[in-house]
Image: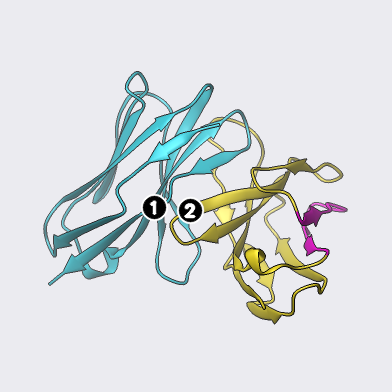
Amino acid sequence: IAGITQAPTSQILAAGRRMTLRCTQDMRHNAMYWYRQDLGLGLRLIHYSNTAGTTGKGEVPDGYSVSRANTDDFPLTLASAVPSQTSVYFCASSASGGATDTQYFGPGTRLTVL
Amino acid sequence: GQNIDQPTEMTATEGAIVQINCTYQTSGFNGLFWYQQHAGEAPTFLSYNVLDGLEEKGRFSSFLSRSKGYSYLLLKELQMKDSASYLCAVREGDYKLSFGAGTTVTVRA
């Protein structure tokens, strides 16, 4: 593994189903993030984690939950999917806090909720 | 939070120069980033500005004026592969970035 991986690449899901999007990084970055990207709206932060064991809410957290049991993994769970959660989801990571900290993005998961 | 504005679309000719403007309003500015995103791919880091002035990286340059809440990304000697979306993002605090909606640049032969 090099960088950030996400799984699945794409998924079609029935409304009401539970879904977990996986994200793994091998760069030993402390901070990780989940964004959704919708046409015309840009990337919006869902949840973030500054370090293993801690998480925080972003701009659009409702309907999503995250956990950060270790440094490498940061799964995003939709407890009961709704059609408005149809989007492209990007996971990102950065080394740590600080002015020059750069976020690096995974390849994304395209999710369709019907 | 931030209010980040950038043009939706721009078109330019191969070999030309294009300037993408970004304006923002924030209560705690801590840096501005530009990312490039090709269709169907992940955003990739292009540049970072935290102090006023111009940062140059090959064909790409980024400028920041903190007092005006303004940045631009300058793409020189445009190539077909530069056709992509360009995302302006502002950091407020240590970790979180807020992104503009992106500017889609189309390079024509």
Residue A104's place in the image compared with A50, above or below, is: below
Chain depicted in cyan: B
**Residue at 67% from the left image edge and 55% from the top image edge:** A27
Q: Position of residue B54 (x, y in %)?
A: 28, 32
Q: What kind of residue is marked 1?
A: Gly
Q: Position of residue B29 (x, y in %)?
A: 49, 25
The front one of A108 and B101 is B101
Q: According to the image, label 2 marks what residue?
A: A42
**Residue at 54% from the left image edge and 59% from the top image edge:** A37
Q: Judging from the image, what secondary structure is the residue with disc 2 in?
A: strand
Q: Position of residue B87 (x, y in %)?
A: 41, 50
Host chain of mark 2: A
Image-based side of B29 in relation to A20, left or right: left
Q: Which image quarter is the N terminus of chain B in?
A: top right
Host chain of mark 1: B
Chain depicted in yellow: A
> In the rendered structure, which segment of residues is drawn in magenta?
A63-79
Establish whether labels 1 and 2 are both on one chain: no
Q: According to the image, label 1 marks what residue?
A: B102
Query: Residue furthest toward the top?
Result: B67
Q: Position of residue B16 (x, y in %)?
A: 11, 56
**Residue at 73% from the left image edge and 63% from the top image edge:** A24
Q: How many marks?
A: 2
Q: Is residue A47 visible?
A: yes
